[in-house]
Amino acid sequence: MEININEIAKRAGVSIATVSRALNGSKSVRDETRQKIIRLAKELNYKPNPFARGLSKKQTDTIGVILPELVDEFFTEIIRGIDEEAYRMNRYIMLSSSHSRRNTIETLLEFMSGRRVDGVIIMAPQIGEDVTPIVQKSKRPVVMLNCAANVDHVTCFKIDNYQGAFKITEHLIGHDYSKIGMIKGPEGNFDAEERFDGFKDALLAHNIDLNQAMIVPGEFSMKSGYYGLLRLMNQKEKPEAVFAANDMMAIGAYGAARSSNIQIPKDLAIVGFDDIFPSRLLNPRLTTVHVPIVELGMKAVRYLLKMINKEVDPRMTYLEELSTGIVIGGSCGCENLMNQSII
Amino acid sequence: MEININEIAKRAGVSIATVSRALNGSKSVRDETRQKIIRLAKELNYKPNPFARGLSKKQTDTIGVILPELVDEFFTEIIRGIDEEAYRMNRYIMLSSSHSRRNTIETLLEFMSGRRVDGVIIMAPQIGEDVTPIVQKSKRPVVMLNCAANVDHVTCFKIDNYQGAFKITEHLIGHDYSKIGMIKGPEGNFDAEERFDGFKDALLAHNIDLNQAMIVPGEFSMKSGYYGLLRLMNQKEKPEAVFAANDMMAIGAYGAARSSNIQIPKDLAIVGFDDIFPSRLLNPRLTTVHVPIVELGMKAVRYLLKMINKEVDPRMTYLEELSTGIVIGGSCGCENLMNQSII
DNA sequence: ATGCTATTTGAAATCGTTTACAAGCGAAGA
DNA sequence: TCTTCGCTTGTAAACGATTTCAAATAGCAT
């Protein structure tokens, strides 16, 4: 039989109310009594039944996490950041990746009306401004990861896509490339759009005209990177350098370059975005934008707990952009120690 | 105010017992009444409070998942398999990766005494036979992933490491290599040991003597693969082929080969185990053992639910080994379509 | 001795379900 | 007419905590 509060109360010779108070740190219990109860609870390895507790306190000590299925590379790291911080804060995490069958919003609503969590962290790069009404309707606080920049009354932590794209484009410009192409991310994905904006503005800032022929669409997938590069290199005017909007597409672009006998970086420079592990294996190592993904998860948890504790207002608009850094490999034309791929 | 069973009962003009019965599919409720209640519940978007329900039924509809931190490559896929199946079965999953701070056993006990889950799936390649007493002490059923082969009274789903290692070693032998080295996995890790056994037995089966000098230890890390290969190739008698006990070490070995100007597969063949994504990016593509990791997770969930429903006895010894297959790349010396890395 | 306050404690209500038990009711059989 | 049975339904007791409110006790001033 599982041991419960009655058992503790009986053995301590007090009422269950006193046990509850002692264990929850209420100050209105004599010190001697508290010590006895705490000792007894430890001895018998008593843990309050979370369901009874949740029923009575209307609090679950659990936070929900909803992730898209596409961002597999981030998945692990995001979870790691969230899990680490949640553990430190004594929270459990309930995970739900939004399969293609059910969309993210459904999953969110299910979580919310299911009352299993105190709050939710959502990563959903595909939904745009329409996220506001959903979040507002929700009875529990929500933190978005990588949401659109212009949403109101939503709390969001995101990567500074614009700045990262701007900087890495400037890096290419610093190599004296002037014909710079880009393989964009999917239409409607705001990570993709912001990276494109950073790219455009960097060119503008250095008085380089944007050549529409140098811009091809992509889907953040390896395959689309492969075909994207082929399209770029089959034109009469070929780029000297290409910015792939994420590393997976850069990896695909490497494949296309290889099959077309294009040498990187001699014939063509390629840079990416994300700094996922496999890009370290490329030869030469990919020059890319590092994103602080673990930190993103940790910050999201910390802020969500503040909202749950009502230290901040969930209906407030709060946007925090985490800055990125460039990782220099050999793919941009740089000659340095990192030039060589690990392999 | 959140809507509850009393509200439904009042509006339907019945007692809460009837509402509960109607919604839980008890047959002892008149069809007409049931229809009315179901319609009403849907209209008002009524969802039973999971805490009240859990308190009363002593069931949580949640399964716990404990993963080690080291197996990052598997992480995503394992989760995907578990999540997919859990969703299909209408279960939630509560995740906890066992950080280095707290060991797996602690985490397990916390889950168990916390009564938040109906059962747990654990992946812990580092704990050996001592898992039996822990699992037996547990009040809730446990499914192990990749446990040691010889544990009793434990339910375990695992990859057939032995068979995979045997087959890929035979593949090398088929290339007429006779001097075959191996970079082993960590001491005490039974995945590592089983792979080593498969390797040894394959040599034995083909009358090739095991040369102890051709066996070096490793840690399943890229770095240990790097140094492992260096050690092997710095001896007077060098291997013609090397079996790295996992892909990460094979990747490290590629790095060592490159830095030593050793051509793969001309000067040296390398094969791995796991078929993780990055091994597809190597040039030539790595020949390796594919492991059905998503399937592993799905099977674990299905079986765990059976145990929870008492369809099978949790104290029984149950071991299921999922067979593996070889993925042929160019690293073993094969000349075929897959020879070329995607990059 | 009386009244007042501060400190601890306990009794009981509450949270929202499930479920054992009882009961009402019409039909069927004796 | 009286039992008995099957079908529905309701009453009330768990389930195991938290929390409100009241009460007991002790200390102190009057």
Image (cartoon, coloured by chain):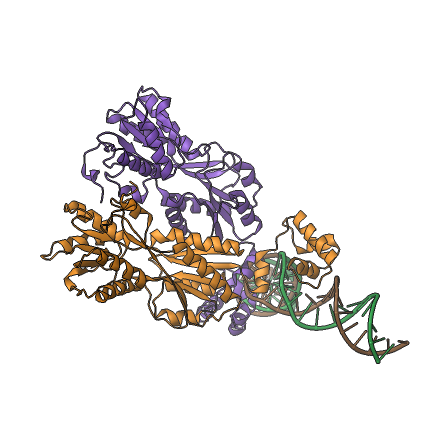
Chain colours: A purple, B orange, C green, D brown
Residue B225 position within the rendered picture, expressed as x and y whole percent measured from the top left: 22, 53
Image quadrant containing the C terminus of chain A = top left
Q: Residue B268's spot in the image, x, y percent?
A: 18, 51
Pinpoint residue A92: horizontal percent, then vertical percent. Answer: 46, 55
Q: Is residue A174 above or below residue B52?
A: above
Residue with the most extreme left position: B236
Choose between A136 and A186: the one closer to the eye. Answer: A186
Question: Residue B92 appears at what percent x and percent y?
Answer: 50, 55
Viewer-proximal residue, B246 or B33?
A: B246
Left or right: where B59 falls relative to B76: right
* Res. B109 image quadrant: bottom left
| Depth check, front residue: B203 or A265 | B203
The answer to whether B322 is drawn above or below residue B77 in the figure is: below
Q: Which corner quadrant of the image does residue B169 belong to?
A: bottom left
Q: Nearer the viewer, residue D4 or B291?
A: B291
Residue in the image at 73% along x and 52% along y: B11
Q: Is residue A288 visible?
A: no
Residue A70 in view (yes/no): yes
Residue B105 vs residue A144: left or right? left
Q: Is residue A202 above or below residue B117?
A: above
Query: Does C30 sit left or right of B155 as displayed?
Result: right
**How many numbered marks, from 0 up?**
0
Would residue B104 be found to the left or right of residue B219 on screen?
right
- Tell me the residue at 25%/30% (across/down): A268
